[in-house]
Image (cartoon, helix red, strand yellow):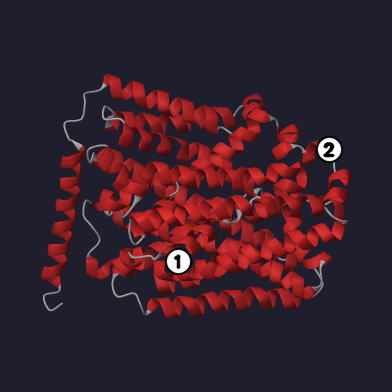
Amino acid sequence: MVENQGVYIFVFIAVTALMILVGIWASKKVKSGDDFLMGGRNLPLPLLIGTTVATLVGTGSSMGAVGFAYSNGWAGALYGLGGSIGIFALLLLFANVRKYNFTTFSEELGFYFGESKLFRGVTAILLYLAAVGWLGAHIMGGSLYLSWITGMDLFTAKIVTALGFAVYTMIGGYLAVVYTDTIQGFILFSGFVMLAILSLVQVGGYETMSTEIPREMVSFLGVEVLGVIPAISLIVVIAIGVLAAPSYRHRIYTSKNTLTLKKALVISGVLFAAFSLFPSIIGMATQIMNPELEAGYAFPYLATEVFPVWIGAIILTAGLSATMSSGSSDFIAGVTILVTDVYQVALGKSVPKDKLKMYSRIALVLTLTLAFVGTLGATNIISYITNFISTIMAGLFAASVLGKFWERATWQGGLACLLGGSITSFIVLSSASLTELFGNPVLPALAVAFIAGIIASLVTPDSIVTKAEALQKLEETRKFEYASQARMEPNK
């Protein structure tokens, strides 16, 4: 437990209360279940930049990267570098899918593979698990704050954190997420810049810092600490996390148009690349101030024990903003997949339009519960993130690339991508020598996923459903749902 505990608890409550008020305000703009999940598909440039940057600067790239830099120096910047590469790759590879008005990533993947029901069902479940996994990472990040500040055990802190950012999402849905993200994005970016500057001043400047910590920590991107292959693996796994994460696809589907989306992705990628420097500086400076810390507590240590209470309150607000903004984004993306895709796969029909908002709120509770359970026993944010990305998302990325850019790809090949990536990841994680060699399983998982997908596609019959026919089937489904709603609501 730290001094000025009451001040920091008040800050947590105040930030949460502000987000709830924004959620209530945003809820007035929600007229339908589709508005609750998709925000009207009309996000303008400022909001799109705000929500994308806030989602990027999440738990991993803030507290996780600070803790990683505390132990590994400039390697902390690899997280931001990987995220920026992921955003620019998303721009080049997938920004043009905005024209199809997809609702979920599994709907997009189903389109690539001829609307195969089996493939879409499997991907829906995997993508839902991916969103739950990301949400769990943010619950972990916020709980580290509360555990340090209040002295409560980590289990209780996880419960409080989860409930804290869940309330405003449940009230206002996706629009609440977007508006709060934009506010939090400004707070967290400004807060981390200020903290990096103050940390350098505290230790006597960068030149002093670079001489007082081990030489390998200030090597280029910390490769002398991690090794070249593990450093590349970390960059790639974070990039894949962006390219295959449901929350970033959600930004594509809800943007105003393709041009607005492309502008937002360029600006967001540049801002995140710049941001990547700050957690590394903060982590290395903290290493000098207190070399005996547990790395995961480097960030809250600065907020509560090094700087005056008013600076600590600002730092704490920035960190909470990072956790809450990213958590709510993955929250709403997971809920959208659950009520649109998983529900349809399980019951063979769509959620009634007039009940979509109610079902979405029920799905919020279920998703939050699963994410919380997934965090039990986990204490290291970076390891948690990299392991589940490699296991679940490497295959999804490989399938999306083959499906979009290779006409010969079949749904069986898509399934082979998913299976090959996951099995390879499990094999690497079960071998201490392979884990040490690669750092995380993403490189072998990606390689096997692509190879398996190509081989399986070549040995199975070519799809008889063209992209044009798949799109027509998708449009017919949408027209049917719209007509059904019109019959239920004849006066609207």
Numbered mark located on residue 414 in the image = none
Q: Can residue 210 be seen in this view?
A: yes
Q: Percent position (x, y) of residue 176? A: 44, 71
Q: Judging from the image, what secondary structure is the residue with disc 1 in?
A: helix
Residue at (75, 52) in percent of width and height: 281
Residue at (78, 67) in percent of width and height: 304
Q: Mark 2 = which residue?
A: 215
Q: Percent position (x, y) of residue 357? A: 32, 69
Q: Quadrant of the C terminus?
A: bottom left
Q: Which of marks 2 and 1 is nearer the N terminus?
A: 1
Asked if the residue at tag 1 contacts the one at tag 2, i.e. Cβ–Cβ closer than 8 Å, the answer is no
Q: 263 or 377: nearer the eye? A: 263
Drawn side of residue 69 relative to residue 395, left or right: right
Above or below for 436 versus 12: above
Q: 275 or 445: nearer the eye? A: 275
Q: Percent position (x, y) of residue 491? A: 12, 79
Q: Can residue 1 be seen in this view?
A: no
**Mark 1 burial class by Cα count in 10 Å: few <14, some 14-19, many 20+:** some
Q: Judging from the image, what secondary structure is the residue with disc 2 in?
A: helix
Q: Percent position (x, y) of residue 355? A: 26, 69
Above or below for 212 versus 480: above
**Mark 2 burial class by Cα count in 10 Å: few <14, some 14-19, many 20+:** few
Q: Mark 1 = which residue?
A: 47
Q: Give the residue type that dot 2 points to.
A: Arg
Above or below for 188 versus 466: below
* Residue 218 position by quadrant: top right
Q: In which quarter of the image is the N terminus?
A: bottom right
CA–CA distance between discs 2 and 1?
Answer: 42 Å
Q: Give the residue type that dot 1 points to.
A: Leu
